[in-house]
Amino acid sequence: MRYKIRVSSRAVIVNEDKILLICFGNGLYYNFPGGGIEENETAKQAVAREVMEETGLTVKIGDLVFSLEYEPKSCNYFSDGTHHISFFFRCYLNHDVPAQSAYHTDVNPDDPSITSEAKWVSLSDLDKVNIVPKVCAPLLKYIDTGIFIPSFWAECEHL
C-alpha cells in the first residue's frame, strides 16, 4: 500500500496593507490562494496557475517564505485526513496584466455547499478570521519585518 502526501504551492500576496485570501462559506474559514502541484509542473508554475484560476490575477513569483507540513494524526482539525506539504511563496501583483474573472471555485469536499471566493483582508483584521492553516502570528511577523528567513513549520507544533 502506498502512502499519499498532497504537495501544494500557495501564495502570500500583500497589497496596500491587505492580504489576498480565499474565503470559504462566507467567512467560515480562509485559506491562501494556491493548490496542488500537477504532473510536469514546478511549484512556482503551480502557484501562478492556481492564483489565476482562483482569483483571476496574474502574479510575479518571489521567494519561498516558508513550507508547512500538516500531518493529520497529530493535528486533526482539518477534515480530509490527508497528509499535506505546502510551499508558500511571496507573490506580487502583475499590474501589466489586467485582472480576469476567477474561473475555478473551490468546494469543500465534506460539504459541497461550502464554496470559495477571493477576498482582500486587512492585515489589522487578520487575527479575527479563521485561517487554515494556522499561521497567522508568524506570517504577520514576516510581513511586518520583511525579513526573509525560509523555514519549515509543522502545523501542530508551536509556531
Image (cartoon, rainbow, N blue to C red):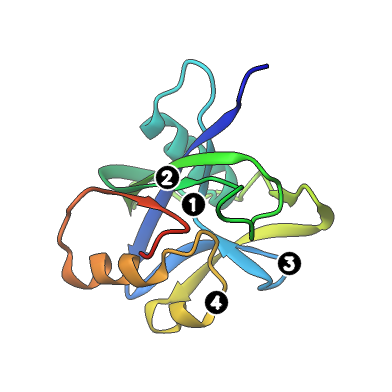
Q: Position of residue 54 (x, y in %)?
A: 58, 48
Residue at numbered disc 2: 58
Q: Which circle, 2 or 4, is nearer the viewer?
A: 4
Q: What element carries label 1?
A: loop
First along the sequence among labels 2 and 4: 2
Q: Do the residues labelled 2 and 4 touch (CB within 8 Å)?
A: no
Label 4, label 3: how far apart the Cα atoms are: 12 Å
* Mark 4 secondary-structure assignment: loop
**Does residue 107 appear to the left or right of 2 in the view shown?**
right
What's the residue type where badge 3 is placed?
Answer: Gly
In the drawing, what numbered circle is on residue 25? Answer: 3
91 sits left or right of 28 in the view: left
**Residue for point 47% across, 58% down:** 156
Instruction: Say if 2 sits above or below 55 in the image.
Output: above
The dot on residue 39 is none
- What is the distance, in whole Å, between disc 1 and disc 4 at their CAs? 25 Å
Q: Quadrant of the N terminus?
A: top right
Q: Quadrant of residue 117?
A: bottom right
Q: Residues within 10 Å of mark 1 (few under 14, many from 20)?
A: some
Quadrant placement of the C terminus: bottom left
**Residue 134 drawn above or below residue 102:** below
- In the image, residue 37 above or below residue 101: above
In the rendered image, which residue does mark 4 sit on? 129
Q: In this view, does 20 lie to the left or right of 1?
A: left
Q: Identify residue type, mark 1.
A: Ala
The image's mark for residue 99 is 1
Disc 3 to disc 2, C-alpha distance: 25 Å
